[in-house]
Image (tube, helix red, strand yellow):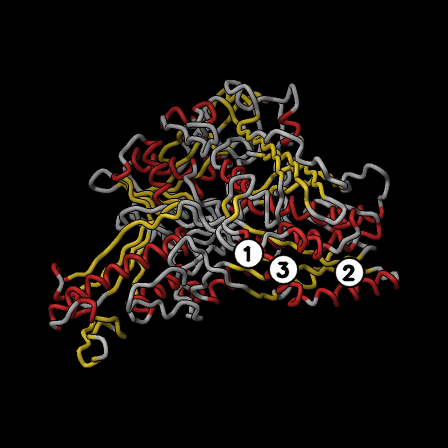
Amino acid sequence: MPGEEEPNVSVSVLGHRVERREDPPLLTGAAEYLADLHAEGMLHAVFVRSTIAHGELRSVDVSSARVQPGVVEVFCAADLGLGDIPEWPRLDGPPRAELGRPCLAKDRVRFVGEAVAVVVAESVAAAVDAAEHVIVDVDPLPVVVDPLAALEEGAPPLFPAFGSNVVLEAPATDGDVLEGADVVVRGRFVNQRVAPAPIETNAALVTPTPEGGLDCVVTTQAPFAVRQGIAGALGIEPTSVRVRTVAVGGGFGAKGGVYPEQVVVAALAACLGRPVRHVETRSENLVAMSHGRGQVQDVALGARRDGTIVGLEAKTVTDMGAYPWRGGIPFRTARLMTNGVYRIPRLSITSLGVVTNTTPIGPYRGAGRPEATAMLERAMDLLAVELGVDPAELRRRNMLAPSDFPYTTPTGAVYDSGDYGRALEAVLELGDYDAIRKEQVERRNRGDAVALGVGLSTFVEISGSGWEFGGVSVDEDGTIAVVTGASPHGQGLVTALGQVVGGVLGVDPDHVRVVHSDTGVVARGIGTFGSRSGQLAGNAAFAAARAVVDQAREVASGLLEVAPADVVVVDGGVAVAGVPATALSWAQVAAAAPGGRLHAEGDFTQEQGTYPFGAHLAVVEVDTETGRVLLRRLVAVDDCGTVINPTIVEGQVHGGLAQGIAQALFEEVRYDEWGNPLTATFADYGLPSAAELPSFELGSTETPSPRNPLGLKGVGESGTVGSAVAVQNAVVDALQPFGVRHLDMPLSAERVWRAVHDRAPGSPDRL
C-alpha cells in the first residue's frame, strides 16, 4: 500500500478471497426488485410512445382513453407542466436550453419511442388497453439516422432554434502531426450502436408522504442524481424527495442519471396523491433506455520504417441520438483516452457530437474508453501489416515505460502509474502466443477452410475521478456500520467495504453493516459508475474507519490509563500494546465514548483519477465457407492496482469480457431509413448467452496507484475496454490471406462471408 501507514492500523484482509455477501439472496430468489413492490392504493402508469421518428406534434387526443374501464387519468406535457431535463455535460459552458429533453414530447417528436402521453389506471392491463385509444397526430418531417448524414448540408435539423445538428465540438490541434512519417495507414472504423440490455428494465415506484414529500424507489445507479433531476423538473426542494433502491438488476452506466419517465411518475404521484408505479417492458427498454457507443472514426497513424510512431490524426463523429442529454460523457472520455498505452509525440483529434432521430446515447460499460481503444488498436494492427512487423512487436516498440510516469498525454490525461509492457508479456505467455502463430502458419500452408486468427489489444482507461462520501460508526451494542454514497448493484461493493472497514477495526467483514442507496439515510453521494466506487467509496470508508480508531484510542487510553499511542487494534477491539489481557471490545469502547458512539465521516476526493490497464488476447476460428466465427480463447491480463478481493475483481473482468465479446460478434442496434428500430426485441437484437462464450483465462499484474491511500484503481470496465477489439483484430487477422484489411463490428457470419466471397472493389466492409 503506497504511503506510510498510520501505526497500529492495517487492512489485513485486502487481497483475500472473501465470499460475496450479496449473492445468497440473488441466487435463492429472496432479493426484492422494484417489480416485486406493491403499495396500498398503487396506480399503474403506461406511456404512449411516438411511432414516428421525426415530426411536428399537432395534437394528442386522450378523450377516448380517459373513459376506458379502470382509467384514472391521462396526461400530456401541457397537463403536467414539467421542466426539461438539461443536456449534460457541455464542453463549452452551461447547458443550452433549446437542447433540453422534455419529459413528455411537446411540439416535436424526435425518435421512435419518445414518450408523448401517459395513462394512469388501476391495473397495468387497463392502462395498456387505454393507451391504444390515445390518438397522436404527428406531421412527419424528414428523418436522419446516420450521424455522417446529419453533418451534410441540408440535413434535417432536429433543433432548428439551435441551428445545427452538431451539438458538441472539440477542435483539432494545429500543425501536421504526421510530418516525418515514412508510412501512414488510414482507415474508417464504425463503432456500432449497442443496447445496454440490463436484466431489469427501468422502473420507478413513487409514493406521496404525509409530510408532502415524495418517496421514490427507482432502479438506478445514482440515487442523488435522480433526486436532483426529479426535484429540478418538478420545481421543488431536493430535500423533499427521497430516492432509494432495492435490488437493481444491472445498470452498466445506462441507469446513471434521471430519465424522463422517472420524473413523470413522480409528478403523477404528487398530482394524484397516490402511489404510482411504472415498469418498462423489454421492447420499451430497447428503444427508451439510452444506447451506447455509436461512433464513426477516421484515423491516420504515421510511423517511421522501424515502427516508431510519429503521430496520430483522427476525426470522430459521435452519434448523440435525439437529445444530447448524457451523450457528452462517452464523447469526452473517448477523446481523452485516444493516446492509449503508447508514446505518441503528436496527436490531433477533431471530435464532433451530432444529433440524429434515434434513441439518445449515454454511458454504457466503458463509456468512450472502448471506442478510443478500438480505434487505436485497429490502427496499430493496420500499421503492423503495412510494415510487416508482428503486432506484438510493434506494440513493444511504442509502449510507455514505467519510468515515464506520471505521464501527460496530448489529450490532457495524466497517467498515474503502470507497466504496460509487463501486462503485454504476461498475456503473450499465458496465451502461448508463439505456438498460436505457428499453428496459424501450418493451417494456412495446408489451405484449411477454417482459418485461425489471433488478435491483441493493449489498453489503458480512466477511472475514479471525483469524490464520494463515507462514514463509519460503532454503537454501544457493538454494531459496526459503514454508510456510503456509492450505490452498489452487483459489483460486490458491500463485501469490499466490509473487508476494508473490518480490516481496519480488526473484525470479521461480515460483522460490518453497509448502508447505501437511500438519500433519506445517507448524507450525500455520487453513485456507482465509471469504475469509481471501490477506490472512492473504499478510501472514504478507510479514512473514516481510521478516524474511528483514533477516537477509540482516546477513549480507551482513559479506561486503561495509558497514552493513546500505546493503544492498538486487536481482534474485536483494542488493547494496550503487548498486553492482550487489557483488551476492550468495540462495544465497551463505544459505550464509554460521548453519546455512547464512535463516529467519523467525510468525503474522499481524487481530482485526476487513476488509470487501470491491461492486455487481452483473442483466438478465433473462422469458417471461410460459411462466415461463422468461433471464439476459441480469450486471455485477459488486467491491472487495477491494489486488489481488495480477487474473486470480485475476476467477476468484474468476466462480466466485462462478455459484453465486449458481445459487441464484437453479436450486438448491434439498427434502424431503417425512416428511423424505425429493427432490433426492438430479443428476437432481433443479438444478445448472446453463456453458450456463445468461451471459458476465460485470466491473469493479472498489480501496480498500485499513488493517488489514493489504498493504491486502488477501477476494474468494472476493463474487460469491455480491451476485449471487443481483441476479438475484432483476431477475425481480421484470420482473413488476411483473403485481402481483408478491416471489418467493422459486429462480425456476423454474413458480414464475414461477404468479405471473403465478395471481393469486388469498394466493398463496404473493406478499407
Residue drawn at point x = 50 percent, y = 27 percent: 135
Q: CA distance from mark 3 to mark 1?
A: 13 Å
Tag on residue 452? Answer: 2
**Alpha-carbon span between mark 3 and mark 2:** 21 Å
Q: Nearer the viewer, residue 342 or 503?
A: 342
User: Relative to 3, does residue 753 appear above or below in the rendering?
Assistant: above
Establish if 382 lies above or below 170: below
Residue type, label 3:
Leu
Judged by depth in the image, the label closer to the viewer, 3 or 1, is 1
Q: Is residue 77 visible?
A: yes
Which mark sits nearer the N-terminus, 3 or 2? 3
- Residue 733 vs residue 380, the one in the foreground: 380
Work out whether 157 lies above or below 45: above
Residue 509 shown left or right of residue 354 in the figure = left
Classify mark 3: helix, strand or loop: helix
- Along the polypeptide, which appears first: circle 1 or circle 2? 1
Q: Amino acid at mark 2?
A: Leu
Label 3 belongs to which residue? Answer: 424
Residue kind at label 1, given as amino acid type: Pro
Quarter of the picture containing the N terminus is: bottom left
- Total count of labels: 3
Q: Which residue is the site of mark 1?
A: 402
Using the rendered image of the protein, determine whether residue 356 is visible from the camera's viewpoint. Answer: no
Q: Residue at x 50, y 18 (%)?
A: 161
Q: Where is residue 151 shown, x and y percent of the image?
A: 63, 26
Q: Is residue 360 left or right of residue 551?
A: right
